[in-house]
């Protein structure tokens, strides 16, 4: 697409980075059937989120370091998987992951969907995934600390998974999906599904071509970043318009949103942002400011 050459204005963050909608696939409980089938999952080429229950021995498996290197997200599913916590069990899991892998933990998933974790996550994380199914819209009021998700029934068909994605696509929204494990495992995974049903589904979702399939931290940072920019302030001075925003607490550094304008030059820290011919400017979130000038 050509660079917009009209009058400066029309500043707008585009939804889902320019995709029609988004899907995040999450795996809870460090289950052995996830480890066993890691290579087939990784071969799909989609960044997943693995929520580790760090008190389980499976969380010591070398597969998780490989998952990290392969571009997947490792998140917090607490140490003990209790429905009650004063924060210490959550923090123990964070310490485990941060010390073992040398990373920062940005998102968690509430064990048993317990509402206890809504308050715990609010002071520690970007997002806490819950267990009730709903779609998430750009700039909506969904609570990031009880983020909805779809849990497939035992032995769910490919079609059942597909429907969750096609409805997200037609609504232009974000769906998160939680798979506990795969049929045939010995780990007692909650409502396991056939590996082939899941794999075939993800291939279908990729084939749609316009859905953003990415980890919770990546889609979540875009969703919360867009909301921060959209609800920020706009001031005009000397023919320039400056947009300012405030990022939420516990926000990962180095994230961007994609922005369109009708014309003009966008600058951050005095440097013009290059136009991406795919149809947008990539605006860094960390500076919490961008200027549009003629
Ligand atoms: Zn769990």
Image: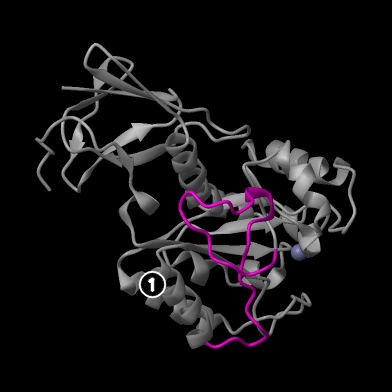
User: In the image shown, does 10 or 271 lie closer to the viewer?
Assistant: 10
Above or below 38: residue 186: below
Image: magenta residue range:
131-157
State which quadrant residue 8 falls in.
top left
- State the image coordinates of residue 193 (x, y, percent, origin top left): 62, 82
Q: Which residue is mark 1?
A: 170
Mark 1: C-beta under 8 Å from nearest atom of ligand 1: no
**Which quarter of the rendered picture does the C terminus lie within?**
top left
State which quadrant residue 257 falls in.
top left
- State the image coordinates of residue 116 (x, y, percent, origin top left): 83, 52
Report how many numbered discs are placed on residues in the image.
Answer: 1
Predominant SS of the magenta segment = loop
Above or below 288: residue 99: below
Q: Is residue 155 left or right of residue 44?
A: right
Q: Residue at x 63, y 64 (%)?
A: 27
Instruction: Decide whether residue 252 is among the magenta residues.
Output: no
Above or below 161: residue 38: above
User: In the image shown, does 150 or 94 lie closer to the viewer?
Assistant: 150
Q: Is residue 176 left or right of residue 119?
A: left
Q: Residues within 10 Å of mark 1 (few under 14, many from 20)?
A: few
Q: Is residue 165 left or right of residue 82?
A: left
- State the image coordinates of residue 62 (x, y, percent, origin top left): 65, 54
Q: Residue at x 58, y 34 (%)?
A: 248
Q: Residue at x 30, y 68 (%)?
A: 209
Report whether residue 162 is seen: yes
């Amino acid at each position: 697409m050509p660079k917009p050459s009209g009058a400066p204005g029309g500043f707008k963050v585009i939804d889902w980075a320019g995709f029609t909608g988004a899907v995040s696939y999450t795996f809870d409980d460090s289950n052995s059937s996830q480890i066993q089938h890691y290579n087939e999952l990784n071969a799909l080429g989609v960044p997943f989120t693995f929520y580790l229950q760090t008190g389980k021995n499976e969380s010591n498996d070398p597969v998780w370091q490989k998952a990290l290197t392969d571009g997947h997200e490792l998140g917090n599913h607490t140490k003990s998987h209790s429905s009650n916590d004063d924060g210490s069990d959550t923090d123990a899991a964070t310490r485990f992951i941060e010390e073992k892998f040398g990373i920062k933990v940005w998102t968690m998933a509430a064990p048993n969907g317990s509402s206890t974790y809504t308050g715990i996550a609010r002071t520690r994380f970007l997002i806490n995934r819950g267990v009730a199914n709903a779609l998430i819209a750009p700039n909506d009021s969904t609570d990031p600390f009880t983020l909805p998700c779809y849990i497939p029934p035992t032995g769910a068909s490919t079609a059942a998974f597909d429907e969750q994605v096609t409805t997200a696509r037609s609504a232009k929204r974000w769906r998160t999906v939680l798979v506990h494990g795969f049929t045939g495992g010995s780990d007692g995974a909650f409502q396991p599904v056939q590996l082939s049903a899941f794999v075939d589904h993800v291939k279908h979702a990729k084939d749609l071509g316009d859905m953003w399939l990415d980890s919770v931290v990546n889609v979540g940072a875009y969703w919360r970043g867009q909301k921060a920019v959209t609800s920020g302030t706009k001031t005009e001075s000397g023919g320039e318009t400056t947009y300012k925003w405030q990022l939420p607490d516990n926000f990962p550094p180095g994230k961007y949103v994609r922005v369109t304008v009708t014309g003009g030059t966008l600058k951050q820290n005095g440097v013009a942002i290059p136009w991406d011919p795919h149809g947008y400017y990539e605006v860094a979130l960390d500076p919490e400011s961008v200027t549009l000038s003629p």
